[in-house]
Image (spheres, helix red, strand yellow):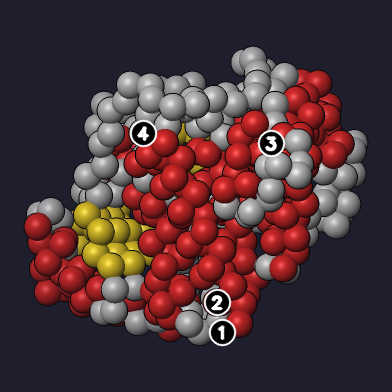
Amino acid sequence: MISFEYYNPAKIVFGEDSEKKLKDLLSAHGVTSLLLVYSGDFIKDLGIYQVVSDAAKALGIKFSENGEVVPNPSIDLVRKLVLQGKKDGVDFVLAVGGGSAIDTAKATAIGIPYEGDPWDFFEKGVVPENVLPIGVIATTASSGSETSNAAILSNGEWKLGFEDDRIIPKFAIMNPRFTAGLPSYQTSVGVADVLAHLLERYFSDEKNSDVTDYLIEGAIRALLVNADKLLKDPKDINARGEIQWLASVAHNNFLDAGRRADWGSHRIEHELSAQYNIAHGEGMAVVFVAWTKFIAKEKPWRAALLASRVYGVDEYNYSEEERAEKLSEILKAFFQKLGLKTTLTELGIGKEDFDIMAQRATRNGPVGHYIALDTDRFKAILELAV
């Protein structure tokens, strides 16, 4: 194991009617002016909007809102929200939704106290002096942003991330029933996103990491079991609860302890979704099928280990490279079972932008830690994804 520090102060409020504890949570944080960030009227259909409105009224909190969040969230909306927040004297940002709403709220929370452009945090690496507190009511099971220290935004050309422990939400309310009405496609891309976060952490060069190796393997097994349950019965609330909790576990950095995650695959997908505005989870499905096929030739040991331990590929009958190749095939079959596309061709994406995406992603040097991707390797994986 490598040395590590772990910190995550997010309070998890999980289960049936957990949203009813919002009033007490806002009171505990002394909120006086609340900005609600969400995406569309579905939060009214779920009754969440009324819960937030009632809590604000009961506590005498000034209440403003914006429901314009879209997938692959944009810095343009954040700029608008920052201006709104400054005008209203906002001292707490509440996100309702999935990763897009939460990341928008996080960027707004660092932008309101800042005098410059909030894109500075993402493009220039500016460290914020002050960060407003953030809360979350999660309505999806996917990104894990509800307990993570990261936010991802796009400016229409670049899709970049920002990390700071101060943007970890103060609390995350998770009622699995809020996910029960999701379209099957959104459920599937969420499952793919959760698996991608687990895989990124599993692919570490650290060989002495038994604790987190087995924890990640167990989490993948749990995800597979409950994904199968949802395919049979999309209303299975217990399966939805398991996957919603797994989304947080997969991305709250606990599974990073003692190891260094890869993240090269995410850099590839960020280029794809920035360029073509595809759904992140489906993009990760495409990328991981190609990436595991690529590493089977270059550095197969981790993929082979996972194939044997989780998927039962016999290490006596297959070489390390063969087991790694089988993992790519297994992942492809799983994503297809979820109803997701697994090639760029299926997404209507050709090769014309491969050069620009590879150069953009590697402008500061190779990306990824398990296997460093320079421009040529980056393009080679995209070729395998066609």
Q: Disc 4 or 1, which lies upstream in sequence?
A: 1
In three-dimensional space, the C-alpha distance between marks 1 and 3, rounded to whole angstroms, equals: 33 Å
Q: Element type at marker 4?
A: loop
In three-dimensional space, the C-alpha distance between marks 4 and 1, rounded to whole angstroms, equals: 35 Å
Pointer 4: what residue? 257
In three-dimensional space, the C-alpha distance between marks 3 and 2, rounded to whole angstroms, equals: 30 Å
Marks 4 and 2 close (CB-CB < 8 Å): no
Q: Element type at marker 3?
A: helix
The amino acid type, in three-letter code, at marker 3 is Ile
Snapshot quadrant of residue 177: bottom left
Residue at horizontal 77 percent and vertical 51 percent from the top: 329
Pointer 3: what residue? 268
Snapshot quadrant of residue 228: bottom right
Nearer the viewer's eye, disc 1 or disc 3? 1
The amino acid type, in three-letter code, at marker 4 is Ala
Pointer 1: what residue? 233
Q: Label 4: how many residues lie within 10 Å, few (<14), some (14-19) or many (20+)?
A: some
The amino acid type, in three-letter code, at marker 1 is Asp
Marks 2 and 1 close (CB-CB < 8 Å): yes
Q: Disc 3 or 2, which lies upstream in sequence?
A: 2
In three-dimensional space, the C-alpha distance between marks 3 and 4, rounded to whole angstroms, equals: 24 Å
> Could you tell me which quadrant the N terminus lies in?
top left
In the displayed structure, does residue 249 sit left or right of residue 14? right
Q: Disc 4 or 2, which lies upstream in sequence?
A: 2
Q: In the rendered picture of this protein, how many numbered marks are placed on residues?
A: 4
